[in-house]
């Protein structure tokens, strides 16, 4: 055997996964500890929802689309409702819009805390996982008291929302936010000062601003690289024009920056929820919706916890949609994993993967990503080698 | 950039092609397939927004399959519409040489609608199962999905 | 008491007090998965029953499945199931795992869990509350301790 040729070894991971709770199959080609190629095969959770929407009516689709993803169910429903309302020319009452924002921000808190736990778990920091999930129960309790379910809240209706806020609920939310805010300060402290965690996050998986733009990253992943991209600010929807959002960005682009950006977004979410509660407009909860919608098409974009969520909705004059296209944020971000994984150490790969907060259920409804060292990553072997050398020299 | 300004500059970039304002914040441009790459290059060179998604629309009655490239800059949305004949195989140039990450969107479309992307760096099967029957494109309106 | 009896009792005791669980998502929306993860965390703390989430199916006693079975996940589900050592038990969590739920009839969904592998415990809900999942696990453990109850559980499930 020719010993001068480096032996390439493929490490398959998944679809049944020790770390992530969702199915995705990864193949990492390694040279020693260093990853030289990466590919992803998804589609294990592909159910064919887009086709299914064409056979159901507008109201039934609301419940189907809400179940694209259990973590960010409310944003899917919101994007769909806003789109359909635009098509039908119906303006939902301001109180309903404010409640949509309220639930969306509560969902962002739950999603970011969930992510914090999962990412800490990937780093082997299970204590942080347990702490953050314990505190996450606070927001789950609020969501349950508000909507009646912990996951898949079904808060949205076409033309409005389903439930109202009572003073009792408002008190509960204020109390919960107080506790969460106090805890979040501690989390920020932990992720920026814990030496062990920093070894796994600082300088790992660095995405520069140029890379982030070139890879088309969205959401907190892009904002951690300094790209100010947030649909809540760029194209405010629902009640966001009345409750402006401050974009949180960082410049480092490494995993630590992604931790910090997501945690800082929590503070922003607390502030927004308080603002909504203080200035909740009075009035109706639902506007009347027609059963059939005239032929038209629209684009609806909302900011999910993971980034920009894109809906294209086309109606054809019946009570069923002609076409609904969903593009989820994970799709934009996942391609970056393969690029970032190449050249890093195998042990860092789970962290890099967790860093984009992937959500395969969202993603697989439509698409999978494949990327290896031969295709669109555009890295030649020489560049790749140089990247690896620089990595270890630093 | 202001939404209306963004749309105006997009209109300027689309001079020579049919374009309409379909909604307040949207501009639709209809192109022939051979002009797509030139227009996309112009958009990228002018740093006008980013590619948000590529949608396929199967219009059986018109006998055509339309591909929609959605670009977003702030609240402004530019949609490039490429009508293609449904039969035999709709085919268009890949925009991957200009926008590398478009590959995943194109492959999704290729699999779901049976669109051929010329010069695409990668046209492998993406998310349909390994044992999926070839030449069955599930999102086409006339797709026969039941094997039995 | 025969020697065999003693060995069986010890085996059952060990099995009931420390069931290792492996989790596989066969196409779920994630809702059930995050609730399963939630039962491991301090509020619900499944570890008081000795439940431990295990990464490898080769070390696990119980397979928790969520979601309708997609065409692509079917073979993988079978393979995960076959890799588990005997005796093995399957818990189907959520409406989709039981009946296909809202995804019934989607072209890439071939059905529910028990069309592919035998299921011991069904936990309904969209998603079920963590308490319900815990209850299902405890019922399974009770059934292991006392197999006479088997029929009642299946009827109740």
Image: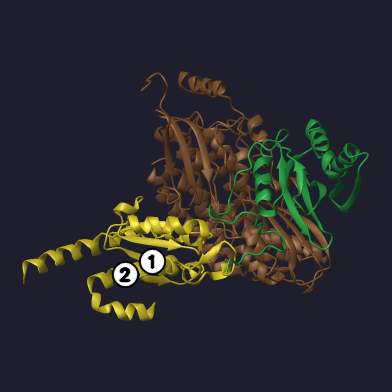
Chain colours: A brown, B green, C yellow
Looking at the picture, does residue C35 appear above or below residue B70?
below
Q: Chain of mark 1?
A: C
Q: Chain of mark 2?
A: C
Element under disc 1: strand
Q: Nearer the viewer, residue A308 or A277?
A: A308
Q: Do marks 2 and 1 both belong to one polypeptide chain?
A: yes
Percent x, y for residue A28?
46, 37
Pick out the residue farthest to the right.
B16
On the rendered structure, is C6 left or right of A39? left
Residue plotted at (42% across, 62% down): C65
Within 10 angstroms of label 1, few (less than 14), some, or many (20 or more) residues? Answer: many
Q: Are marks 2 and 1 in contact (CB under 8 Å)?
A: yes
Q: Which residue is mark 1?
A: C91
Percent x, y for residue B111?
65, 51
Dot label at residue C140: 2
Percent x, y for residue B120?
68, 38
Q: Quadrant of the N terminus of chain A?
A: top left
Looking at the picture, does residue A122 appear above or below residue A379?
below
Q: Nearer the viewer, residue B105 or A187?
A: B105
The quadrant in which residue B14 appears is top right
The quadrant in which residue B3 appears is top right
Q: Nearer the viewer, residue A47 or A171?
A: A47
Element under disc 2: helix
Give the distance between the C-alpha atoms of the residues marked 2 and 1, in whole angstroms: 9 Å
Percent x, y for residue A129?
42, 48
Pick out the residue farthest to the front.
B88
Residue plotted at (51% across, 52% down): A180
């Amino acid at each position: 055997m020719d010993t001068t040729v480096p032996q390439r070894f493929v490490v398959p991971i998944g679809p049944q996964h020790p770390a992530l709770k969702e199915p995705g199959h990864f193949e990492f080609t390694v040279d020693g500890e260093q990853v030289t190629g990466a590919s992803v095969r998804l589609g294990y959770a592909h159910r064919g929802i887009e086709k299914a929407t064409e056979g159901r009516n507008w109201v039934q689709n609301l419940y189907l689309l809400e179940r694209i993803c259990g973590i960010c169910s409310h944003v899917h429903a919101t994007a769909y409702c806003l789109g359909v309302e635009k098509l039908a020319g119906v303006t939902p009452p301001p109180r309903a819009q404010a409640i949509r924002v309220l639930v969306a921000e509560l969902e962002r808190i739950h999603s970011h805390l969930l992510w914090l736990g999962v990412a800490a778990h990937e780093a082997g920091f299970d204590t942080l996982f347990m702490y953050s999930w314990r505190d996450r129960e606070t927001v789950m309790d609020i969501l349950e008291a508000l909507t009646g379910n912990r996951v898949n809240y079904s808060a949205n209706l076409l033309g409005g929302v389903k439930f109202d806020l009572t003073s009792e609920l408002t008190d509960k939310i204020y109390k919960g936010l107080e506790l969460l805010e106090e805890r979040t300060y501690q989390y920020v402290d932990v992720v920026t000062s814990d030496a062990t965690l920093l070894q796994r996050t600082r300088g790992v998986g660095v995405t520069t601003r140029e890379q982030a733009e070139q890879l088309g990253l969205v959401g907190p992943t892009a904002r951690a690289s300094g790209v100010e991209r947030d649909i809540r600010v760029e194209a405010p929807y629902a009640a966001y024009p009345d409750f402006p959002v401050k974009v949180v960005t960082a410049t480092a682009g490494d995993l630590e920056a992604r931790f910090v950006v997501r945690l800082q977004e929590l503070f922003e979410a607390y502030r927004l929820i308080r603002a909504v509660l203080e200035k909740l407009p009075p009035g109706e909860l639902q506007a009347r919706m027609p059963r059939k919608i005239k032929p038209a098409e629209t684009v609806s974009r909302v900011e999910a916890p993971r980034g920009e969520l894109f809906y294209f909705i086309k109606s054809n004059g019946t009570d069923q949609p002609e076409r609904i296209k969903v593009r989820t944020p994970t799709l934009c971000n996942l391609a970056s994993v393969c690029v970032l994984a190449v050249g890093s150490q195998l042990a860092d790969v789970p962290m890099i993967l967790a860093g984009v907060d992937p959500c395969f259920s969202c993603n697989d409804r439509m698409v999978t990503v494949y990327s290896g060292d031969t295709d669109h990553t555009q890295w030649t072997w020489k560049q790749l080698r140089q990247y690896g050398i620089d990595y270890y020299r630093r | 950039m202001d939404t209306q300004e963004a749309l105006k500059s997009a209109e300027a970039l689309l001079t020579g092609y049919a374009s309409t304002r379909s909604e307040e914040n949207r501009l639709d441009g209809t192109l022939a397939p051979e002009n797509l790459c030139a227009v996309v290059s112009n958009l990228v060179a002018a740093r006008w927004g980013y590619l948000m998604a590529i949608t396929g629309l199967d219009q059986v009655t018109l006998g055509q399959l339309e591909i929609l490239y959605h670009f977003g800059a702030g609240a402004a949305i530019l949609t490039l519409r490429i009508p293609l004949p449904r039969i035999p195989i709709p085919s268009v140039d890949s925009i991957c040489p200009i926008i590398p990450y478009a590959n995943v969107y194109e492959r999704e479309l290729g699999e779901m609608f049976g669109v051929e992307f010329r010069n695409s760096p990668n046209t492998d099967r993406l998310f349909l199962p390994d044992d999926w029957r070839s030449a069955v494109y599930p999102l086409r309106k006339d797709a026969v999905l039941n094997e039995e | 008491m025969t020697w065999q009896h003693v060995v069986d009792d010890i085996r059952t005791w060990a099995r009931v007090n420390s069931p290792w669980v492996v989790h596989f998502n066969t196409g779920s929306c994630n809702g059930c998965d995050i609730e399963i993860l939630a039962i491991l965390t301090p509020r619900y703390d499944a570890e008081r029953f000795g439940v431990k989430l295990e990464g490898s199916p080769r070390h696990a006693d119980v397979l928790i499945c969520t979601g309708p079975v997609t065409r692509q996940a079917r073979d993988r589900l079978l393979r995960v199931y076959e890799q588990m050592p005997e005796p093995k038990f399957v818990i189907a969590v959520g409406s989709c795992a039981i009946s296909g739920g809202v995804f019934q009839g989607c072209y890439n969904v071939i059905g529910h869990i028990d069309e592919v592998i035998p299921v011991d415990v069904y936990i309904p809900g969209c998603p079920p509350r963590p308490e319900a999942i815990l209850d299902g696990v405890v019922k399974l453990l009770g059934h292991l301790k006392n197999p006479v109850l088997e029929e009642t559980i299946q009827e109740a499930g």
